[in-house]
Image (spheres, rainbow, N blue to C red):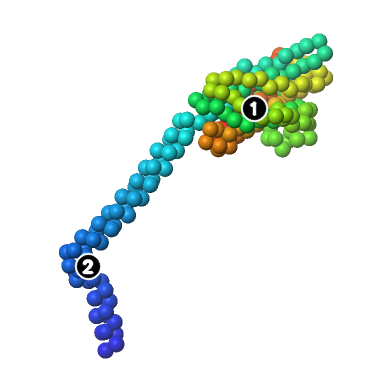
């Protein structure tokens, strides 16, 4: 008897829709439709906002104009930074360090071998991380230069094909929406002052 009563109650619960009048059904369907509409609207709003922020923000990176400047008593690596976006990049800061490669001498001519991982270069530090000292602003399409001195002895080794000099750095900045971004770069000097990009650690968010 008890089991029959439970089945009757379950059947009653399952048939609740059939027991509603047309007003209750309409209200229930309207509630479901409103919930779905709100979810879709919220999703479209987030997509539109993300696209707007992406289109309006600053994009800071390095250019292909990086050169080695050789003087009588000094050697300088000149890195050119540019804002490719349409709004200013604020609180820009750079950190650049340099490492000596330990590849075999036969690898200093094209095609070059893959660049090593940073963990394999840590013990061959030539120049410790050097910051720009103070933050600055880069306006749209504006370029600015950062300089890092290279020991003459390391430069001559690279020039003679006895070593590869690697340059690793990152650029941090805030866009106009006060969102922080980071650009990293990894390059190497091989032979006759040739600067090439490595196959890793070149990223931008």
Q: Is residue 114 visible?
A: no
Mark 2 crowd level (few <14, some 14–19, many ≥20, 10 Å Cα): few
Camera-nearest residue between 55 and 11: 55
Mark 1 crowd level (few <14, some 14–19, many ≥20, 10 Å Cα): few
Above or below for 146 versus 38: above
| Residue 153: % across, % down | 82, 19
The residue pinned by badge 1 equals 136
Question: Picture quarter containing residue 17?
Answer: bottom left
Q: Which residue: 55% across, 33% down?
A: 175
Residue projecting furthest to the left: 22
Left or right: residue 11 versus residue 96 is left
Above or below for 203 versus 75: below
| Residue 194: % across, % down | 67, 16
Left or right: residue 80 versus residue 15 is right
The quadrant in which the N terminus is found is bottom left
Left or right: residue 150 versus residue 66 is right
What's the mark number on residue 17? 2
Left or right: residue 150 versus residue 112 is right
Q: Which residue: 34% across, 47% down?
A: 40
């Amino acid at each position: 008897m008890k089991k029959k009563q439970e089945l009757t109650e379950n059947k009653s619960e399952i048939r609740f829709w059939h027991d509603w009048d047309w007003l209750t059904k309409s209200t229930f369907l309207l509630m479901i439709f409103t919930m779905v509409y709100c979810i879709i609207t919220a999703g479209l709003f987030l997509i539109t906002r993300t696209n707007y922020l992406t289109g309006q923000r600053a994009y800071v990176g390095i250019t292909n104009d990086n050169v080695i400047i050789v003087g009588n008593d000094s050697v300088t690596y000149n890195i050119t930074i540019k804002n490719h976006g349409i709004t200013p990049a604020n609180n820009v800061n750079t950190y650049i360090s340099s490492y000596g490669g330990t590849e075999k001498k036969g690898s200093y001519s094209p095609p070059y071998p893959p660049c090593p991982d940073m963990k394999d270069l840590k013990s061959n530090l030539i120049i410790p991380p050097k910051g720009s000292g103070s933050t600055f602003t880069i306006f749209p399409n504006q370029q600015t230069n950062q300089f890092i001195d290279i020991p003459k002895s390391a430069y001559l080794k690279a020039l003679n094909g006895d070593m590869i000099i690697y340059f690793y750095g990152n650029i941090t900045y805030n866009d106009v929406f006060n969102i922080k971004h980071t650009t990293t770069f990894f390059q190497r000097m091989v032979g006759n002052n040739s600067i090439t990009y490595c196959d890793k650690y070149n990223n931008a968010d």
